Structures are given as structure tokens and as C-alpha cells.
């Protein structure tokens, strides 16, 4: 589904990603872990197409569903089935969640050659998905993330994920800033959305999220490279040992 | 202290905040859809202004002697007046002797029946999206169509007439309802109010007249569509709306003009009078030609709009969406004279290219328990300058006056300006006056967020801008709100690189 080869990316002339190799198949859940500043969020932003980052296209290769991802606009990536749950979701005052999500879903449907949903059809779908992620229906008519608490914003991202039905969902530090109850609710939402067709990339600093969403693979990013990959055990090892041993190993081999 | 209601000055000592942002690129040439002209034989007065021109104008319109005298009095006052210069706009003073003050389609429009209206005019308004044949009209809106200096058609008059409602060109009202016109014309905006109001009083050629009799709720929205067509002419329309005791009316106004390299002057006066328990809601979507990218051409829109809540429990509400004109100078205001009267001002002003807008309102609290609300949203893009200027004055006898003001500015790009000039003058200790202001910009984060949801940048901008304007659009009738929203999207097309 997603193949990343030797991905190099920089911002303001500073190289952040220094050659990432990575592969995701349908149905898989990958966790990307790593100490602060290792490039985790940059990796998520680059995959989603944030133009603030410059990808070195002379060496980098990224294929998504058979297409050269680097040539696609962020909106086309989204329409093809990529979804990024933001670490800091953005507020759009004056636009209701329902309106925004319908506009978004209809763009995606149009791309797929499907008819747009009218407000009534959409309302039905939205209510179903709100139940799925345990969100109060009043949030449908609230303005997009405006005045939401940190936990509400994160849950709203998961609601969008549920409605837009992407093929690949990237969750950027979705656990940060959540108390344990909010974390559990968000994780339950994600677990309900797991399917053999849909893949997830979980970007996280802490392993606690992985207690709730059990990954198939864990990768450790350090100084812009994946320095270690493994199964779920790797996350547990990181929890008990911290990141220092990773740093030491990586710095020695470098 | 000068009369605060007049537009000849604003108090000095404005607070001021200049803002600019960096991220978004300059606006590209947003396509103006109404820039074409109608090829129609037009009778145009020779350029220039003097008493003979005014007399001829008055004669041409078969006006009674008192009207001619009224005009001449205004003209004489105007000659001794100076242009207002306190607004934050810069332009070359128009050469008032280089403008023609009257232009009309040659075939004299007989408005007894639409069949007699020149098909070219019907076609023009059809093309503007204002079909005048009544059967084609959206039910619920009656239209007065003003083409250059004259009203060419007024629809739905018969059904309104049966309820005692008068909706006609003001030129006709002067002839057929002289008592009403004499009583109210100039009662809210006196002839000598300000330079442009005086000029308008001298040379106004047409506009709409509305009278709603006591106890009548107007069954449909009334509207006027103003179209400037002829070159090198000014449009000076005059609108007078009276809601008698317990009456209610909603009035809509739209405007467009062809694209031309020269600046054209539009100096209108609108007066509203609300008697006891009456309500007038006045909505404008102004889309005059704004000039090109370099600031060549466009309409100078110098307008005096004012309403008076004459008696208790009356209400006047102004809603405006200003997207056009090279220069906008306009402060739709409310004089809250009657006890418990209510004044409202809801405004969206968008400037791009080299446009300059200095717009806002005045709320003058005279009666007891009067309240006013001001919601102003300004959007600046390109190299434009957009100012809110508003006065809230509470006079000594206005016990328990209330005002709430909210001014929000949205900036696009780093070469535009947004400014807020609030004036608050309270002379009664029981008053409660609130002012809130904010400045924001469309952020790259907002746009990227929308993109990752499948929404392309231009649609994302439109989404953010529409959200920003929501509180104002909520006060527009449905069709107008849709039109306003579309207009903003079109205006901002190409606003990012």
C-alpha cells in the first residue's frame, strides 16, 4: 500500500529525515516511536504532503497505492484514501463539524466517482459514526474544533477518520495531552475501525497508547532514520529501558 | 460639539491598529462578472453642474416647484462645502464639472406595464440575474430596477398597492405622493449634512420610495437593483423608506457597474424612518466594479445611509456585504430617538487589489432603554486597505442604553491593511457599552488541515472566510446569503499562489 525508500526531507534548509525505508501493507498497524526531535511528526507531515517540508526528490521514493506520492497534492492524497489525524487539530470558527465533514467526504466521493451525499443522508452516516466513537451528537453542530478541549479535538479527529473511511490512517501523537479515560475512548474508536483493508501508522512517544491499540510492528526513529524495527515487544522494551540504549547503539554504529 | 449624527465629521483622536500578515500571496485578477455594458441609446446631459442643469433635471422629471427649490437650496449649500477628508482613503478629488449628472435610456420608459419596457433593458437585468417579468420572479421579492439615472421597472406593484403599500420610483413619488415626500425627504439626512449628501440632494435622479401604512407587515421583500451603464456619468440615487406605526418591511439592495478605466462616482442617500413599533430591515450586497489590479478605474462609492427610530419600540437593522467599489465611504447609522428602540449593524467588507474601504456605523442613543448591536467583519487581501469606523454615542437622557460592538478583521497576505477606529462617547452613567475586537489571518495550518481532508486550497479559503462571516450572513435573507457567499468565493479566487 505504502512504500517509502530513502526518504530525505528538510525544513528551512535543515535536514530532518535522513533516509527512511518503510513499508505498510493493508490491515497492518505500525507504530513509529522515538525520542523527541527524532523526526516522527515530520514523517507524518511529509506523508500527508505538508509543503513546509522539502522532500529531496532526487533520492526519495514514495509509492502510495501504486502512485508516486511525491507528485500528488495533499488533497489528492486525501482523496485517494490517506488520512492524517493531527497532533494539534486546527480550529475553523463559523463552520460546523457536520458541514465541514460533508464537504470533505463529498470531495472524496467525487474522486471515487460516487454521488455526493445530501445533508439528510450524511446526517444519518454522521450519527452512526458518532455513536461508534462515543461522541455526543451536539458536536455535529459545533464549529470545527472551536473551543474544544484537547481531548475533544483528538476525539473529533477519530470521528473524521471514521466518516472519511481512509485506506491508510496516520495518527500523529494522538495520545499526547489525553488523560487515561480519553485515551481509552480514542483507542477504542481506533480499534473499531481496524479492518483487513485499512492500515494504520501510529506516531507516538509513549508506549502506553500501544497497550490499547496493539501494533503489528514497532519502529524506532532516531535522528531521522529508522534505527530498529520489531514486534510489539520492542515497545515494551522501550518502556522499561527508555531511549538511551537506542541512542547509544545508533550513535556507535553511525 | 457638532451634531453627532452628521457625516461631516468623525471625532478626532481615533485609536488605531495597523496590521499586516506575511503568508498569503497577493490576490490575482478576480473575475468581475458584471463588467459588460448594454448598448442602448442613451440621453446624457452635457458634463458639468450649475443651476441650469439642476433646473433642467427637475423639469425633465416633471417635478413640482418645491422640489426644484429644494434641489437648488442643496446645491447652494454644497458649493460652500468641503469634501470629507477624515476617512482613511486616498484618491484624487473627482472633477465635478467633468461628470454628467443625468443619463437615461432614450425610449421613455412607461412603467404601466412591463411590456412597454425596452427589451434591451429587460435583457440587461435578466443577464444580471434579475429577471423582471413578474411570473419569472422568485415569489416573495418585488424589484425596482434602476438603470443609470432612472427607474425602468417596478414589479409587484399591484398586489402591494392593495395593502396600501407604496413601492415606486422616488421620481414618481414626488409627483404622486408629495405630502409624504415633503414630510420625510431630508428629515433624516438633511440637505447640508455632508458634502456628498448635499450633492446628492441637488442632483439625485431616481431611487426607490417605500411607504408601509400602519399595522401592515409587508408580505414580500422589496428590493432595488442599481445598475450603472453609461460612461462618465455619476449615479445619485435617493431612497426613502417609511414604516408607519406597527409596520414591518425588509428591503434589499444590489448594485453592479461595467468595467471601465475611469473612476465613476456613486453618491447615494438612503433615509429610513421607523414609527412606533415599526421594524425596517435593510440589506445591501454592493458589488460595484472595483477597478483593476493596478487600481485603475472603479466606482467611488460615497454613500450616506441613516435611519431614525422616531418613536418607541421601533427597530432598524442594517446588514451590508461590501465587496466592490474602488473606494467605499459609508456609515449606515441609527438614531435611536424613541424609548426602547433598537439599532443593529451587521457588516462584511471585503477589499482586494487596490480597493479602499472606510465603513462602519453610528449609533446615537437618545431615548431611554435603547440598545444597539454592531458586528463588523472585514477581510483584507492584496494591497487593499480596510477600515472600520464606528461611533457609539449615549446622550444624557438615554437612561439604560446598551451597546455591544464586535469588530473582527481577517488578513490575507502581507501587503494589506486592517484598521479599527472605534469612537465611544457616553454621557449617561447608566449606559453599558461593550467593545470587542480581534484580528486574525488565514493560516497555512488551516489551509493544510482542509487539504488533508480532500478540500483544495481555494475552497478552503472560501470555507474559512464564510465561517468568519457567519454571524453577518445569518442576518441576510436566504437568497442574499447564498449570493453573498458566492461573491466572496469569486472575489477571493486566485488569492493564493
Image: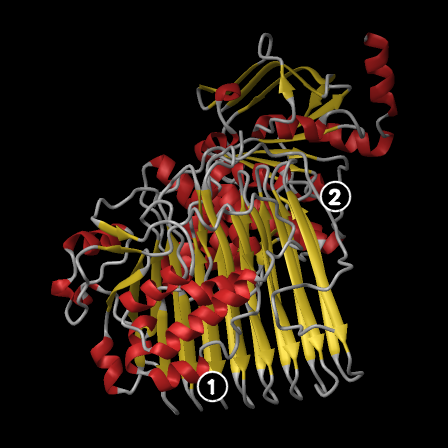
Q: Is residue A132 visible?
A: no
* Quarter of the figure with residue B125: bottom left
The picture places residue A119, in percent across and down from the top left corner, at 39, 57
Apparent side of residue B153 relative to residue B495 in the rendered image (left or right)? left
Task: Report the front residue among B488 and A7.
Answer: B488
- Total marks shown come to 2
Answer whether labels 1 and 2 touch (C-beta < 8 Å). Answer: no
Q: Residue at x 76, y 28 (%)?
A: A34
Residue B451 percent location from the top left of the image: 52, 37
Q: Nearest the camera: A194 or B18?
A: B18
Image point 25% across, 46% down: which residue? B38
Q: Horizontally, is B356 left or right of B14 in the view? A: left
> From mark 1 to mark 2, how far is it between C-alphas?
56 Å
Chain to which the residue tagged by mark 2 belongs = A
Q: Determine which quarter of the picture holds residue B427.
A: bottom right
Residue that label 1 marks: B278
Q: Quadrant of the N terminus of chain B?
A: bottom right
Look at mark 2 in the image and give the residue it sits on.
Answer: A176
- Using the image, name the chain to which the residue with label 1 belongs: B
- The image quarter containing residue A170 is top right
* Left/right of residue A89 with respect to residue B455 in the rendered view: right
Q: Position of residue A139 (x, y in %)?
A: 57, 61
Q: Residue B411's mark?
A: none
Q: B317 or A137: which is nearer to us?
A: B317
- The nearer-to-camera label among 1 and 2 is 1
In the image, residue A163 sits, relative to residue B166, either above or below, namely above
Q: Is residue A113 visible?
A: yes
Residue under the point 45% across and 49% down: B97
Amino acid at each position: 500500500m505504502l512504500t517509502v525508500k530513502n526518504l530525505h526531507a528538510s525544513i528551512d534548509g535543515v535536514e530532518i529525515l535522513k533516509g527512511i525505508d518503510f513499508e505498510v501493507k493493508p490491515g497492518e498497524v505500525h507504530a513509529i516511536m522515538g525520542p523527541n526531535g527524532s523526526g516522527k511528526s515530520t514523517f507524518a507531515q511529509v506523508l500527508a504532503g505538508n509543503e513546509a517540508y522539502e522532500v529531496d526528490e532526487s533520492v526519495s521514493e514514495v509509492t502510495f497505492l501504486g502512485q508516486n506520492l511525491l507528485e500528488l497534492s495533499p488533497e489528492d492524497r486525501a482523496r485517494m484514501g490517506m488520512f492524517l489525524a493531527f497532533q494539534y487539530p486546527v480550529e475553523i470558527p463559523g463552520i460546523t463539524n457536520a458541514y465541514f465533514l460533508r464537504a470533505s467526504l463529498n470531495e472524496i466521493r467525487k474522486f471515487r466517482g460516487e454521488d455526493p451525499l445530501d445533508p439528510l443522508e450524511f446526517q444519518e452516516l454522521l450519527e452512526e459514526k458518532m455513536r461508534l466513537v462515543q461522541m455526543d451528537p451536539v458536536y455535529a453542530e459545533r464549529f470545527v474544533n472551536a473551543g474544544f478541549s484537547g481531548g475533544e479535538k483528538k476525539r473529533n479527529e477519530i470521528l473524521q477518520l471514521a466518516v472519511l473511511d481512509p485506506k491508510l490512517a496516520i495518527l500523529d501523537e494522538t495520545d499526547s495531552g489525553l488523560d487515561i479515560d480519553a485515551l481509552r475512548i480514542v483507542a477504542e474508536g481506533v480499534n473499531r475501525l481496524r479492518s483487513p483493508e485499512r492500515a494504520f501508522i501510529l506516531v507516538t512517544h509513549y508506549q502506553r497508547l500501544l497497550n490499547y491499540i496493539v501494533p503489528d510492528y514497532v519502529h524506532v526513529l532516531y535522528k531521522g532514520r529508522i534505527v530498529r524495527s520489531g514486534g510489539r515487544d520492542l515497545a515494551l522494551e522501550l518502556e522499561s529501558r527508555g531511549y538511551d540504549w537506542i541512542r547509544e547503539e545508533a550513535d556507535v554504529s553511525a | 460639539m457638532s451634531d453627532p449624527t452628521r457625516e461631516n465629521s468623525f471625532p478626532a483622536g481615533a485609536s488605531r491598529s495597523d496590521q499586516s500578515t506575511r503568508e498569503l500571496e497577493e490576490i490575482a485578477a478576480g473575475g468581475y462578472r458584471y463588467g459588460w455594458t448594454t448598448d442602448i441609446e442613451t440621453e446624457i446631459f452635457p458634463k458639468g453642474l450649475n443651476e441650469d442643469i439642476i433646473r433642467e433635471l427637475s423639469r425633465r422629471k416633471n417635478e413640482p416647484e418645491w422640489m426644484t427649490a429644494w434641489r437648488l437650496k442643496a446645491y447652494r449649500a454644497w458649493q460652500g462645502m468641503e469634501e470629507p477628508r477624515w476617512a482613511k482613503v486616498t484618491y484624487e478629488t473627482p472633477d465635478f464639472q467633468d461628470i454628467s449628472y443625468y443619463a437615461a435610456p432614450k425610449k421613455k420608459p412607461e412603467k404601466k406595464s412591463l411590456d412597454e419596457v425596452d427589451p434591451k433593458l429587460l435583457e440587461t437585468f435578466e443577464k444580471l440575474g434579475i429577471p423582471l417579468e413578474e411570473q419569472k420572479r422568485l415569489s416573495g421579492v418585488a424589484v425596482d430596477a434602476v438603470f443609470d439615472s432612472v427607474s425602468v421597472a417596478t414589479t409587484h406593484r399591484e398586489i402591494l398597492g392593495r395593502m396600501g403599500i407604496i413601492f415606486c420610483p422616488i421620481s414618481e413619488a414626488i409627483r404622486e405622493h408629495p405630502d409624504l415626500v415633503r414630510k420625510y425627504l431630508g428629515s433624516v439626512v438633511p440637505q447640508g449634512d455632508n458634502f456628498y449628501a448635499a450633492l446628492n440632494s441637488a442632483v439625485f435622479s431616481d431611487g426607490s420610495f417605500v411607504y408601509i401604512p400602519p399595522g401592515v407587515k409587508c408580505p414580500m421583500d422589496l428590493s432595488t437593483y442599481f445598475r450603472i451603464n453609461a460612461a462618465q456619468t455619476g449615479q445619485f440615487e435617493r431612497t426613502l423608506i417609511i414604516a408607519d406605526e406597527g409596520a414591518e418591511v425588509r428591503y434589499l439592495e444590489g448594485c453592479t457597474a461595467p468595467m471601465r478605466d475611469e473612476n465613476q462616482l456613486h453618491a447615494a442617500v438612503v433615509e429610513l424612518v421607523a414609527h412606533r413599533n415599526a421594524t425596517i430591515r435593510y440589506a445591501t450586497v454592493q458589488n460595484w466594479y472595483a477597478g483593476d489590479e493596478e487600481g485603475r478605474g472603479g466606482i467611488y462609492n460615497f454613500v450616506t445611509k441613516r435611519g431614525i427610530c422616531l418613536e418607541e419600540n421601533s427597530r432598524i437593522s442594517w446588514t451590508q456585504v461590501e465587496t466592490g467599489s474602488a473606494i467605499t465611504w459609508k456609515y449606515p447609522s441609527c438614531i435611536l430617538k424613541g424609548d426602547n428602540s433598537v439599532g443593529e449593524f451587521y457588516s462584511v467588507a471585503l477589499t482586494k487589489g487596490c480597493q479602499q474601504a472606510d465603513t462602519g456605523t453610528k449609533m446615537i442613543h437618545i431615548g431611554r432603554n435603547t440598545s444597539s448591536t454592531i458586528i463588523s467583519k472585514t477581510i483584507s487581501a492584496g494591497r487593499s486597505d480596510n477600515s472600520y469606523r464606528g461611533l457609539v454615542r449615549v446622550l444624557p437622557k438615554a437612561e439604560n442604553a446598551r451597546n455591544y460592538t464586535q469588530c473582527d478583521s481577517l488578513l490575507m497576505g502581507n501587503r494589506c491593511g486592517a484598521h479599527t477606529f472605534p469612537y465611544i462617547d457616553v454621557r449617561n452613567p447608566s449606559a453599558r457599552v461593550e467593545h470587542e475586537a480581534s484580528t486574525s489571518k488565514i493560516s497555512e495550518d488551516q489551509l493544510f488541515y482542509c487539504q488533508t481532508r480532500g478540500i483544495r486550497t481555494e475552497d478552503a479559503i472560501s470555507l474559512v472566510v464564510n465561517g468568519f462571516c457567519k454571524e453577518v450572513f445569518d442576518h441576510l435573507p436566504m437568497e442574499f446569503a447564498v449570493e453573498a457567499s458566492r461573491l466572496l468565493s469569486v472575489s477571493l479566487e486566485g488569492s493564493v499562489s
